[in-house]
Amino acid sequence: MSTATKVVHHKEILGHPIGLFILFFTEMWERFSYYGMRGILVLYMATSATAIDPGLGWSNKDAIWLYGWYTMLVYVASIPGGWIADKFLGQKKTVMFGGLLLCIGHGVLAIPQSWAFFTGLALIILGVGGLKPNISTMVGGLYKEGDIRRDSGFTIFYIGINVGAFLASITVGLVAYYYGWHYGFGLAGIGMLLGQIVFIWGQRFLKGVGEFTGGSEATEEERLAAKRPLTKIEKDRVVVLLISFLIVVVFWGAFEQAGGLMNLYTDAKVDRHIGLSWLEEIPAAVFQSLNAGYIIIFGTIIGSFWIWWKKSGRESSSLFKMAIGTIIMGLGYVFMMFASQEASSETFGKAAMFWIFLAYLFHTIGELCTSPVSLSFITKLAPLKYASIMMGVYFAATGFGNKLAGTIGESSQLESFNGEMVVSKQEVLPFISKETFKIKDANNKVVDTTAYPIDEDKNFSIKSTVYPENGTVVFKDFETGKNLNRLFELAQGGDSKSHQLLEVLKENNVTEANPYHARLVFEKDKDKAQIIENKGDGKDYGVSFVLEEEQSEQEYATFMWLTIFTVAFGLLLLLFLKKLKKLTHGAEDNEHEILEQEPYELANTELNN
């Protein structure tokens, strides 16, 4: 056998082994680092490269594209991470090495250089792959087969994940908002370092959990068990696990819009103004704390509810909980549909914040019914010799769900129309107003200044009405009605952007009396902006925009189809629930309370004889 958990006595706190709380705090800080970085990642990529704290200057579409790939790979790496643990190092050592890579990766990410950004992401992917599946398997290793506390143990562990996520979303988001992106990335790295320290310190409470026994230390019985082919029951259970992984892909494909589409939507189309003297508006990244905060509040309530539900003799299988969770999570997007309708009800309108609060509430309840249960489900059904690999496959399924989320989010963002500003600065000034914003002075200190954005090479935008007239597209200032066409130029020709724009407007019967609208965003070329002599010359500005009505319609359709598909998928699972339960061969039928003096181990009937 590659990785086993030997029978040992574990002291308890609050009715659970002390080791659970070592893993709780280790994972709490690891998730602090992950969700802290995740909360600002897309915003950092989509922030202008000429901002006071420059981002990468990518389009929303490209930012979500990379976000999808990153969040997929960070979990797909769990497959080799689980394999390494099962075949070579054991879960405990693999967690240790994974944590080390994460510390290095987050540290590198705090360096404000392009090479550091991609290198840091790569190291984080490898680190999470080593840590994530194996620390979860170690939680299962603390409980004896049939222990009814296993699900609640995973719920407690899951609360730890979200305490870290909650703290990170607020602190990292605010630090990035006030001090800069790379300070936010650095704070996330400090969190990972604390997690590594906790894990090293708590080794004495994890004796016999996650040890590697595939080498010379393995007993003859363990070697034979490792070589024994799977039984019919084990094969059936693996089939059920693989089906449950499909649930995982669908669930996270919808849920993980939080870091991409919903993050950008909150930033652009939600009224976040609160008017405090020290905080005019809530940073979009801080809304990521809602999910984690709700889990801290409702985690034990939902866990206790399912225990009561089971003791009442009602259907309470893991598959049932996962189906219900998927349905509830999907219904959360109904509130995003309402938000989209409210924002679209007036030109350049914004939605109220409470829609976001309600959406995250439903997403969280769905998550609590699905995610910790699925983690526990794996430790109940997976053959012991494949425990870490199956946990790795689970997290890989989560990764594929994240990539699906990225693809869905990417499809919700329309390609922007682009052009170049073709007039002097003086001709643009009548259409823009002075603003108070932050700049760096000669001593590299951040100070407030009031000026036209174009004087400081900053981005500026002009709200415009858009409609076709005599074979051309007319742009007029939304507030004054003045013509804007002379300010910029779109590419010409049969297949040009201007031709595409004209066709879209005609197809939707847009007229001067019933126009479309666009926010024209002017941004200086980031390379030219680095030349001090060019500062404030008003040259080398590009323009980009999407049609507000088309973008709103696309977002509404995305939220609607997310609702329809997830609810329908959950109902389909309920329809086939009995057939799927048969394949588990009663793995969840004999759960009961375990007394403190009893030993704990991963489920493996052969080792318990």
Image (cartoon, rainbow, N blue to C red):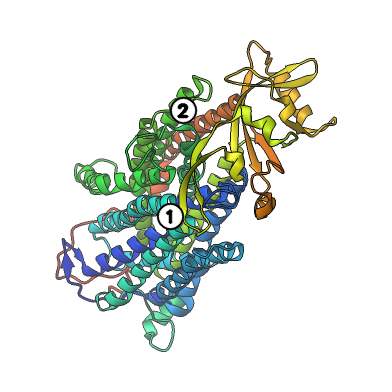
Give coordinates of residue 607: x percent, y percent. Answer: 31, 74
According to the image, label 2 marks what residue?
Answer: 350
According to the image, label 1 marks what residue?
Answer: 179
Q: Quadrant of residue 338?
A: top left
In terms of secondary structure, where does tag 1 sit? helix
Front tag of 1 and 2 = 1
* Viewer-nearest residue: 98 or 86: 98
Label number found at residue 116: none
Q: Is residue 273 above or below residue 70?
A: above
Residue at image location 59% in from the left, 37% down from the top: 460
Give coordinates of residue 310: x percent, y percent. Answer: 23, 45
Left or right of 293 on screen, residue 99? right
Residue at image location 39% in from the left, 69% down from the top: 384
Viewer can see residue 277: yes
**Callout 2 amino acid:** Lys
Give coordinates of residue 543: x percent, y percent. Answer: 68, 37
Q: In the rendered view of the protein, which quadrant contains the N terminus?
A: bottom left
Q: Quadrant of residue 522?
A: top right
Residue at image location 42% in from the left, 71% down from the top: 99
Left or right of 275 on screen, residue 521? right
Left or right of 564 on screen, residue 407? right
Q: CA distance from mark 1 to mark 2?
A: 27 Å
In terms of secondary structure, where does tag 2 sit? loop
- Of callouts 1 and 2, the N-terminal one: 1
Give coordinates of residue 404: x percent, y percent. Answer: 56, 46
Q: In the rendered view of the protein, which quadrant contains the C terminus?
A: bottom left
Q: Is residue 232 above or below residue 575?
A: below
* Viewer-nearest residue: 491 or 565: 491
Q: Residues within 10 Å of mark 1 (few under 14, many from 20)?
A: few
* Viewer-nearest residue: 149 or 404: 404
